[in-house]
Amino acid sequence: MTIDKILEPEAVRVLSACSSKKRLFQELGNIAESVYNMDQQKCVQALHERESLGPTGVGNGVALPHARLRGLDRVVGAMVVMDTSIDFDAVDRQPVDLAFALFAPEDSAVEHLKALALVSRTLRSQSLCAKLRANHDPATLFTILTEAQSSQAA
């Protein structure tokens, strides 16, 4: 599994007016709807339900919200870089400005976990996160993410 198999270039966005976790989930739902033809409300609800089990802020300004949804045939993702950090109840109590959301088929436990591990490994790199934070062009952000993974595999 590779990032370019789960993330469409159009699903990478820069958010300039995101003020809360609730608003972030709305934006991620909008991306899922416009790029993957998913139901925006169901995406938002699924993200909130998963988040109620425990925060998905993994530290160093990164969040990995994820959810399983009926009707999907593969794992898909949405990546956002926020101009302003938001409180996310992250494990390190630091605000979040990078979020990579994953939406997986309801019955895809293995694929969901593989995708989550892939994204987590990729965004664990502080130098990669610095590059993402320094760029505000979605196409460049997509390239940074996909090239980072291919250089890790090399």
Image (spheres, grey):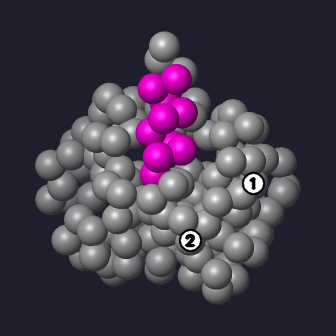
Q: Nearer the viewer, residue 117 or 69?
A: 117
Q: Nearer the viewer, residue 71 or 6?
A: 6
The dominant secondary structure in magenta is helix
The percent position of residue 84, horizontal first and vertical second, equals 75, 75
Query: Residue under circle 1?
Result: 61
- Tell me the distance, in whole angstroms, between the alpha carbons under discs 1 and 2: 15 Å
Residue at 45% over, 70% down: 28
Q: Secondary structure at mark 2?
A: strand
Rendering quarter of residue 88: bottom right
| Of pointers 1 and 2, the one earlier in the residue sequence | 2
Q: Which amino acid type is shown beneath numbered disc 1?
A: Gly
Residue at 15% over, 59% down: 71
Residue at 36% over, 57% down: 9
Q: Nearer the viewer, residue 42 or 97?
A: 97
The percent position of residue 34, horizontal first and vertical second, equals 28, 76
The percent position of residue 109, horizontal first and vertical second, equals 31, 35
Range drawn in magenta: 142-151
